[in-house]
Image (cartoon, rainbow, N blue to C red):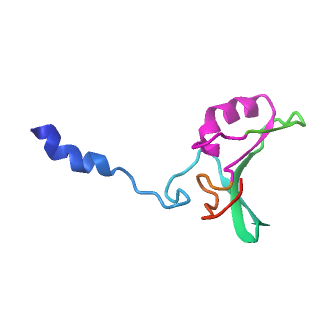
């Protein structure tokens, strides 16, 4: 009985905007504005520079239904070994534009 009374509050959870407004990534989010398929879009991305650079860069691409923020642990390890890491939220996902009509 007590579980049923608490269910509505539990089911609500945090509310985020369509571009995950209110959800913070572990690293600062940058924004790249672009025109594609006659639309003005933006792609959010992480550009994490290491404290002791080795001169190399790694680009991490997420799969369907994932975000750049899911690479947090990988970015940390790569940064510790000197890699600059760039991880975009691809168009249609997470903090990037979600166009209604778009050919991927």
Taking depth in this image into account, of 34 and 49 the one nearest to the observer is 34
Q: Which residues are magenta?
A: 61-90
Position of 79 compared to 95: left or right? Answer: right
Residue furthest toward the right? Answer: 55
In magenta segment, residue 40: no
Q: Position of residue 1 (x, y in %)?
A: 9, 38
Give the residue displayed 69% in from the left and 51% down from the top.
Answer: 90
Task: From this view, report whether residue 13 is shown above or below residue 41.
Answer: above
Q: Quadrant of residue 38?
A: bottom right
Give the residue displayed 65% in from the left and 39% down from the top.
Answer: 63
Position of 33 compared to 62: left or right? Answer: right
Give the residue displayed 78% in from the left and 28% down from the top.
Answer: 81
Q: Position of residue 3 (x, y in %)?
A: 16, 38
Q: Quadrant of residue 100?
A: bottom right
Taking depth in this image into account, of 31 and 77 the one nearest to the observer is 31
Give the residue displayed 90% in from the left and 37% down from the top.
Answer: 55
């Amino acid at each position: 009985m007590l579980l049923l009374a608490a269910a509505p509050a539990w089911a609500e959870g945090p509310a985020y905007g369509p571009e995950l407004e209110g959800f913070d990534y572990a690293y600062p989010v940058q924004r790249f504005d672009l025109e594609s398929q006659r639309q003005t879009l933006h792609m959010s991305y992480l550009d994490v520079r290491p404290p002791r650079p080795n001169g190399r860069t790694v680009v991490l691409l997420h799969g369907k239904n994932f975000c750049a923020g899911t690479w947090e642990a990988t970015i940390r390890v790569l940064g510790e070994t000197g890699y600059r890491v760039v991880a975009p939220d691809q168009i249609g996902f997470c903090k990037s534009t979600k166009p209604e009509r778009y050919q991927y």
